[in-house]
Amino acid sequence: MASDQDPSDPQLPDSFEYSSLPDDGSSVCIRLLELLPGKGGEEIRIKLSPVSLSQEIKYEALSYCWGSAKTTGFILCNGKSFAVTANLMGALEMLRQEDSTSRLWIDAVCINQGSISERNQQVAVMRDIYSNANQTIVWLGPEADGSEIALGIIPDLLAVRDKFGGGWGNSEAPIEINTRYLEAPEEIDSAPGVRQLIQNTQARTAFLALLGRPWFTRVWIIQEVVVSHHATVVCGSVRLPFDDLVQAAWVFDSLGLQTNIGLRRLLEPLWDIWDTRRKYDDWWPNTMFQLLLRHRWCLATDPRDKVYALCGIANDAKTESQRNSEQLPPDWRQVVESQPLPTLVNNPDYGLTIVDVYTKLAANLLTSPNVGLDLFSAIHPSIPRIDGLPSWAPDWSVTDRFYNFRVSSKNFFYDAERRRPFESDPTSSIQPHEGGYSVRGGSVGSARDIWLSKAVAWRSEYLRSFQACRESHSDIRVSDPPQTITLSGMIVDVIDTVGQPSVSAGSRPYEFLMRVAEWSAIARDARLRVVAANEAAALAGIKDGEHMAIPAAPYLLSADHQSAIRAWVLTMMGGHVYVETEIHAHVGFNMLHRAMELSQEIVFYKTMLEIAELRASGGLATLNAPESSIKEWEAYDAETAGTLLAEAEAKLAGLRSNRYWILVERAKEALGVGMHTRFVVGKKGYYALVPAAAIEGDEIVVFRGGCMPIVVRDRRQIVGDCYVHGIMEGEVWKEELCREFVIS
């Protein structure tokens, strides 16, 4: 047992002091510790000695969460007193053998954390440290919160996988379970193992508590698990393969054993870790930008580690010799070599400030042909940001999830030559799809097409490919040092009417729809305003739209109110038709889409009913409405409007009572439109879904070379990207209207 005495106690041995690591210039040296044998209750003793990283030596690497530094104990290191956190102490006590020595690498012990130069050197080779280890021990902590019960149901979950999902090693097993569960739920529900899981509330709660442990949220553990040849989870005295934990969690989720979307969020970190590991093992390019997006939710005590912890697994953050040793296929090499970042991230420097690291990285990415202005889509709309960070540089320390309209952390593939995502590459199997494009997979024979096919096999996404600037090229210039950027763009619209921010990401679908109904009323009023303005212009002899440099949104001028409804629903969806291969997400998406249409129709028919009553009482003139709208309203008397309203409300109620209504939560999460967004209407009537931080008077700008419109404040601050219906394919782009912006 470790001592918990005060380090100043004269009875304690002298404190351990590090010696510099040897440097022979030929290979990097690291330290390994030998955990000496002992029984429970005895003091923990270790020996620390340097070894060459190129030396063939057997050891295990520990992946763990440091825990609070306020709770520490003391062990003996080379006969000297050494302070360790309580969590590490628990790991050492559990890993110690009674009659044999264990050789380990543990960052808190093997790296002199007080030396910046040593930290810089050792962090740069951590990928090699974990990949050279015989195995990585994932220490989740001692038994607590029913962990023994949680670990006890893993064999049952794996049995369900084997019975219904095609067995071990089948990456499509969860999808097969989802499909069968929707087609014949009684078949799975009645299975003995499943029935017990459904009825065992205590086990379900314990399993979620296990996956909610701090280890799953730390940024460093991603690289540690991803590069490991074999990872073993240890919780208390129980050991199991990391792959078993992932597969069990997947079955747990596929069966819907989590009770709501908030609890399901506990599973998402595991999915992202597994996604990165699988891509790494299968030679899928993982760029720094992709990794930063996928693991943005991760926590780090030092915000600089949000970047440095991902260096070892980012293809474009490796030196040329490292890329050559990995023998990437030629078609993939162009993706990572066109965006080299070794000078910044391959040599971590803890002497730099957080602002320095994030700003230099942003400058590299902005001038990269693979990322460019797509970087603006990674700017979190939260306020405040790290003090001193330019508005054009993402704050990677922010872990709160939000929705961005351009970049997907799941499947975002860049074509280095075209500067466009592969989903828009005509050489791949991209087929037209209602409301967007579908990635069908297939193979034309190139590595890139195989890459796409593998992506579709894992998760098929139906995405719109936006190009608001058409084929224009960016003219961005970054100041030296990187403090401001200068670029050209055109102002499309100015935010005029602002809806309330979206409800929280974990809200119920009906709460989300209520906020959507509020936004729907804003859309209705905007249509009336734009139509009235257009009619006034027509009376003055000006043709439709010619009284403004950029015409009003055409969907607001249509005589068919359904045109405006369709535009509004697509705006709510961020323009995407997004469907996962998981059938439950497809079903949920369709239900959400229909529910949003019905909520818009309900607002419309309520308005028609109110107007019919006004018309009957002679009060219609008080509305000061445009003539075309009055003609449209005449088609709805009180009886007709009331009937249509009742029908729409009944249909929405029917959706809400549907047995699959809970699946709308999945679709809402997949779309992400409920996270940190708000609906606005511009002065020209354009419908837009913008960051929640946007305010009235902010300008919507399309920059040269930018696929997405960007919300800009005071012509010098980036707020974030947005979806503006009717301009996303370059419909209003005009080079001659561009002006220069200096963004700080």
Image: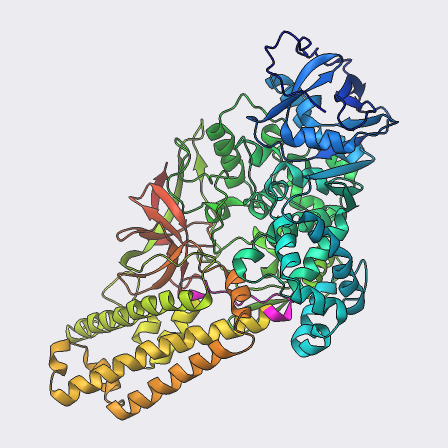
As displayed, is residue 733 above or below residue 303?
A: below
* Residue 608 drawn above or below residue 417: below
Does the rendering let one see residue 315? no
- The residue at the point 47 percent across, 39 percent down is 395
Q: Quadrant of residue 445?
A: bottom right
Q: Is residue 81 magenta?
A: no
Count every numbered label the image shows and give the total.
0
Expressed as whole percent of the image width and height from the top left, the position of residue 423 reads: 60, 60
Decide if residue 398 is on the left or right side of residue 561. right
Q: Horizontally, is 468 left or right of 463 in the view?
A: left
Find out whether residue 583 is within the magenta segment: yes
Q: Quadrant of residue 440?
A: bottom right
Dominant secondary structure of the magenta stretch? Answer: loop
In the figure, residue 521 lies in which quadrant?
bottom left
Q: Residue furthest front?
A: 41
Q: Is residue 169 above or below residue 389?
A: below
Image quadrant occupied by the C terminus: top left
Q: Horizontal and vertical percent for residue 190?
A: 72, 75
Q: Position of residue 678 (x, y in %)?
A: 36, 58
Residue at left offset 39%, top offset 87%: 647
The percent position of residue 200, horizontal first and vertical second, equals: 66, 62
Q: Which residues are magenta?
A: 571-584
In this image, 212 relative to 75: left or right? Answer: left
Q: Is residue 1 visible?
A: yes
